[in-house]
Amino acid sequence: MGLFITFEGLEGCGKSTQARLLYERLQARDYPVILTREPGGTRIGELIRRILVDLQHTEMAATTETLLFSAARAQLVNELIQPYLNTGGIVLCDRYADSTYAYQGYGLGHDLDQLYAIIKVATGGLMPDLTIYLDLTPEEGLERKQRARSGHAANDIEQRRKAGIIPTSVGLPPFSAPSVSSGAEWNRLDARDLVYHHRVAAGFHELIQREPERWRVLDARLPIDQVMQEVEAAVEPLLAGVTQLKDGR
Ligand SMILES: Nc1ncnc2c1ncn2[C@@H]1O[C@H](COP(=O)(O)OP(=O)(O)O)[C@@H](O)[C@H]1O
Ligand SMILES: [Mg+2]
């Protein structure tokens, strides 16, 4: 029941941007849709997120990190994702279990079979119907992220919205989730070296090869609205199974 779509890729590749845009497009078409993010998305999950991203937490063990991500995910699946899917709605999630395989597995060297078991406990086995991978090199991603952080980057979405290229969302979401922040934060996980981010990228590509039918790989270097069109094209065939809200809530 419902439709579960996740966005994956390295920091700065445009996940939050594209997840937000898809959310707004679906909402404008009266689809029942919520947007959430990992780690976080719930009150408890956002508290766990703060522990995970804190630059001062240099002593955090890899296992602690994995279990905290999983704890946040368990709360998100139980409190928000699964109940909303059960109503037949669309859930968009900015990162999900694949990030654990890529970052804690391929990146930090945590055993993949163990991760599989932990993820299964945390999610009850729930996996996305579609995962959009926004493909960008670690160098390009970190550069975008740093540019956004130092405030040189124009806020593309806001400018486009003001220019009328991107419509603002219509009405209220049928279910309110905590909002997703901009990509301007710089955190403990971004601060790791480039070699690590290259291992993560290679890990994502291995995950894609293992399950090519679930993933859609898009070139994240294209302009935002071009990527957006490709995201929509990937999602469109799956919308047939979702009932639109009749009263246009
Ligand atoms: N296709 C794109 N081309 C150029 N800049 C982009 C594109 N997509 C996103 N950006 C910019 O890159 C930065 C990171 O985007 P964001 O969506 O926060 O990435 P992520 O959530 O994957 O870390 C933001 O400043 C955003 O405006
Ligand atoms: Mg983001």
Image (cartoon, helix red, strand yellow):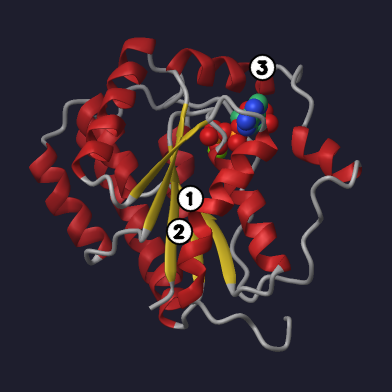
94 with respect to 29 (left or right):
left
Q: To which residue does mark 1 refer?
A: 47
Q: Is mark 3 within 8 Å of ligand 1?
A: yes
Q: Is residue 9 above or below residue 97?
A: above
Residue density around tag 1, few if under 14, some if 14–19, many if 20 or more, within 10 Å: some
Viewer-nearest of labels 2 and 3?
A: 3
Q: CA distance from mark 2 to mark 1?
A: 5 Å
- Sequence-wise, the earlier of marks 1 and 3 is 1
Label 1 amino acid? Leu
Circle 2 sits in a helix, a strand or a loop, which is it? helix
Residue drawn at 60 percent across, 28 percent down: 222
Q: Is residue 63 left or right of residue 99?
A: left
Q: Nearer the viewer, mark 1 or mark 3?
A: 3
Q: Amino acid at mark 2?
A: Ile
Q: Are marks 2 and 1 in contact (CB under 8 Å)?
A: yes
Q: Which residue is mark 3?
A: 147
Viewer-proximal residue among 102 and 69 = 102
Q: Circles 2 and 3: CB distance less than 8 Å?
A: no
Instruction: Find disc 2 in the rendering and name its residue.
Output: 44
